[in-house]
């Protein structure tokens, strides 16, 4: 079985050293960032090289939400507005979100990327940290769940798997988890009525990403490394897709990457996501992470079986419809 981790790489071309390492380490998948993106042809060559390195059709992920989180942009790809801004002005937000996600998926599939780390199903509120706020879809369970569902459907229609994030909810976090550890002190009853409820309505999606957030009603450890939080995700929320961590190297977590990864897997995450492509960290992670468990491998197989050929799309007409909906 593949290793229980996802890795990045250093630049727009896969080095011989990286190719040999990936062949031996056999990560489940790969994730790309702006540092890996150059021209479409070069990006296609990179996604082919990553899959060739492990000898299988491994998933290749990216964060292409639009707005402040967008790894691919002009001159080759669309510059997308912030999701919250676009949804606030859309006359039919669910249709607009579907079209947006479908068009993004088309650009990703064209260069060999088949997983997008979206929808972001956290609920916006008065304490949401600015690093996250503009990336969100609304401020109510109904609004966010409907728009996140439309996003996921748009991804799938374009042949790209969605990743539901950040389970079980990052919207109440008033700290940037890239830099520190957010803490949410709402009661479990309140969380289940709002933040957690959105993810419960989307629990059938195939892939999900954890939240580096403390929910004091459940535990004093960050959700990613908390058995109690993962039990809530698998239990009350009912999510049975493949659960990856948010980037394990983020500032919210303590200890070295090997320790963080071991804690996340012990808590119940299926795979560890490592994003920065740093050589020493990737080697340490590969040594620390075992092969995927049978349960994780089964979830992964179910998810990847949903990868399908994109449905037909008139791209120009879809852009025109989206523009008319959001003018």
Image: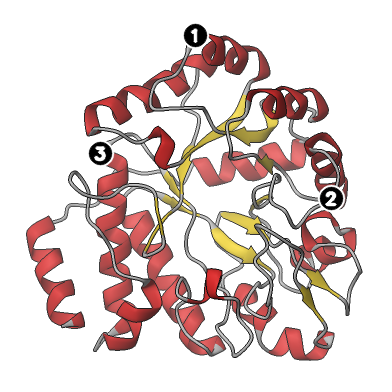
On the rendered structure, is 142 left or right of 281? left
Q: Nearer the viewer, residue 269 or 32?
A: 32
> Which quarter of the figure has residue 289?
top right
> Where does residue 225 sit, x and y in percent of width and height?
83, 54
Residue 99 visible, this orientation: yes
Q: Residue at x 55, y 33 (%)?
A: 8
Check disc 3 and report its element: helix, strand or loop: helix
Q: Which residue is mark 1?
A: 16
Q: Residue at x 63, y 21 (%)?
A: 26
User: In the image, which disc is placed on residue 110?
Assistant: 3
Q: In this figure, which colouring scheme has been used for the structure?
A: secondary structure
Q: Please say if the residues under marks 1 and 3 sit with CB atoms less than 8 Å apart.
A: no
On the rendered structure, is 101 left or right of 250? left
Check disc 1 and report its element: helix, strand or loop: helix
Work out which quarter of the rendered image holds the N terminus and state it: top right
Q: Residue at x 19, y 44 (%)?
A: 76
Residue 314 visible, this orientation: no
> Where does residue 20 sit, x and y in percent of width and height?
57, 9
Q: Disc 2 to disc 3, how far (Cα)? A: 38 Å
Q: Disc 2 to disc 1, how far (Cα)? A: 32 Å
Q: Nearer the viewer, residue 24 or 80?
A: 80
On the rendered structure, is 312 left or right of 37? left
Work out which quarter of the rendered image holds the C terminus and state it: bottom left
Q: Disc 1 to disc 3, how far (Cα)? A: 25 Å
On the rendered structure, is 96 left or right of 176? left
Front: mark 1 or 3: 1
Check disc 2 and report its element: helix, strand or loop: loop
Q: Is residue 150 above or below residue 1?
A: below
Q: Which residue is mark 2?
A: 254
């Amino acid at each position: 079985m593949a290793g229980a981790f996802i890795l990045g790489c250093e630049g727009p071309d896969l080095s011989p050293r990286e190719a040999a390492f990936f062949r031996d380490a056999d990560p489940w998948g790969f994730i790309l960032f702006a540092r890996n993106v150059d021209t479409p042809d070069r990006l296609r060559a990179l996604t082919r090289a990553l899959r060739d390195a492990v000898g299988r059709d491994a998933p290749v992920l990216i964060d292409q939400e639009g707005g402040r989180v967008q790894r691919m942009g002009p001159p080759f790809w669309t510059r997308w507005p912030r999701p919250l801004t676009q949804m606030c002005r859309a006359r039919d937000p669910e249709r607009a979100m579907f079209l947006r996600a479908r068009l993004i998926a088309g650009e990703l599939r064209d260069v060999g990327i088949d997983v997008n780390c979206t929808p972001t199903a956290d609920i916006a509120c008065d304490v949401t940290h600015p690093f996250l706020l503009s990336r969100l879809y609304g401020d109510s369970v109904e609004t966010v769940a409907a728009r996140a569902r439309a996003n996921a459907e748009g991804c799938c229609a374009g042949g790209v798997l969605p990743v539901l994030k950040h389970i079980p909810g990052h919207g109440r976090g008033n700290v940037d988890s890239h830099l520190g550890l957010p803490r949410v002190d709402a009661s479990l009853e309140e969380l289940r009525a709002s933040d957690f409820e959105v993810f419960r309505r989307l629990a059938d999606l195939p892939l999900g990403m954890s939240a580096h957030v403390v929910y004091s009603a459940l535990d004093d450890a960050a959700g990613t490394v908390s058995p109690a939080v993962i039990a809530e995700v698998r239990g009350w929320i009912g999510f049975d897709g493949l659960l990856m961590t948010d980037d394990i190297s983020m500032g919210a977590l303590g200890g070295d990457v090997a320790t963080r990864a071991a804690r996340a897997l012990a808590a119940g995450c299926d795979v560890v996501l490592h994003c920065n492509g740093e050589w020493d960290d990737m080697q340490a992670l590969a040594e620390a992470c075992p092969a995927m468990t049978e349960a994780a491998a089964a979830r992964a197989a179910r998810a990847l079986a949903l990868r399908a050929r994109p449905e037909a799309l008139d791209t120009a007409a879809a852009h025109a419809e989206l523009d008319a909906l959001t003018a």
